[in-house]
Amino acid sequence: MAIPLFVLNNERNRVYKQRRLLESLSEFEIRKHTGLPWWGARELIEWIEPEVEPLARRNYATPAETKILTTLGFFRSGSFQWMLGTVSGTSQPSCSRIIAEGHANEMIRFPASVDERNIVSNAFYQVAGLPNVIGIVDGSHVLIKAPTDHGGVYINRKQRHSINVQIICNHQDKITDIVAKYPGSSHDSFIMRNSAICHRFQRGEFGNNVLIGDSGYFRAPYLAIPFSRRAALSVEQQLFNTALTKTRSKVERCIGLSGGDLCYEPAKVCKLITASVVLHNYCVNFGIPLLDEDEHQLELIIHGLAEDELD
């Protein structure tokens, strides 16, 4: 089967080590189970491998490549089923911990300098004319296993156990700040008021720049929300609401790309959420497309596989 053009266009001028497991899997298998193209999975392995490689070169030690592929498959489906028939002894928790603790500060960064903020605010201004916006804040509920202790506080308004995760994203679908520690019963505005990023805005670290959110948040000099429709709105207020809604559509798309269900205990889920955001931002930084954004290419791959079977 011919190599798809999107693979060739994203190749980097670097030498890669031979990978027995990765090279034994087809493009379709990699994309189906990790949500990434083959070359994207390889890039992530190259990035994380030095920190996950077993220290002892024993025959029964699980290779880093296997651990990372298993972790990627886990984040996509919440299950180890894909790899269970191939390997044993894989440690997803250790791999997730390394990703979360070792790369969170590197990959999850809020725009701090004036130049960084200007780039983001100018990009948001092009969407609907809202000035000074450097991020969109929203909450996303990640379902969890019912905790044995204090389970009631994790029940959200839909009567499901969850972690209410606050994320802030920029114009590129990159998550620039995350708070993943509050139970599902916590309100979005409570999480925002108690977050480090809110305190930084209150101290004036970001000048006249602002965040935008939905009606679940509070109005503040640094946080713009829609005007309530319960009262008659002026033309200016209606135009503002329209522009804010159009700009906020970015965060809904970002949550759609990064959300999911992780039916484990809260402490483990919070680490997994951070690790998944690190991987999400890595893909954004290096132009690794996600499966849902490239369905046409997947159809071409499936068609190519079918042709190979006929040959």
Image: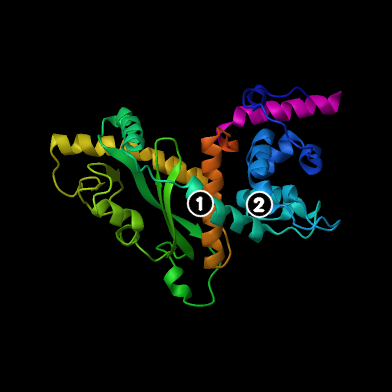
Measure how far apart labels 2 and 1 are at the Cα level: 14 Å
Residue 71, image x and y in percent? 66, 52
Residue 293, image x and y in percent? 55, 33
Determine which quarter of the picture holds residue 119: top left
Image marks 2 and 1: residues in contact by CB distance under 8 Å: no
Q: Quadrant of the N terminus?
A: top right
Judged by depth in the image, the label closer to the viewer, 2 or 1, is: 2
| Residue lying at 24% horizontally and 39% vertically, measured from the top left | 241
Q: Which residue in the protein does label 2 denote?
A: 51
| The residue stretch that appears in magenta | 293-311
| Residue lying at 67% horizontally and 33% vertically, measured from the top left | 39
**Magenta stretch prevailing secondary structure:** helix
| Residue lying at 79% horizontally and 24% vertically, measured from the top left | 307
| Residue lying at 76% horizontally and 36% vertically, measured from the top left | 26
Residue 17, image x and y in percent? 76, 37
Instruction: Specify the amino acid type for callout 1.
Output: Ala
Determine which quarter of the picture holds residue 250: top left
Dot 2 crowding, Cα within 10 Å, few <14, some 14–19, many 20+: few
Residue 67, image x and y in percent? 71, 52
Judging depth in this view, the residue of 187 and 130 nearest the camera is: 130
Residue 104 is labelled as 1
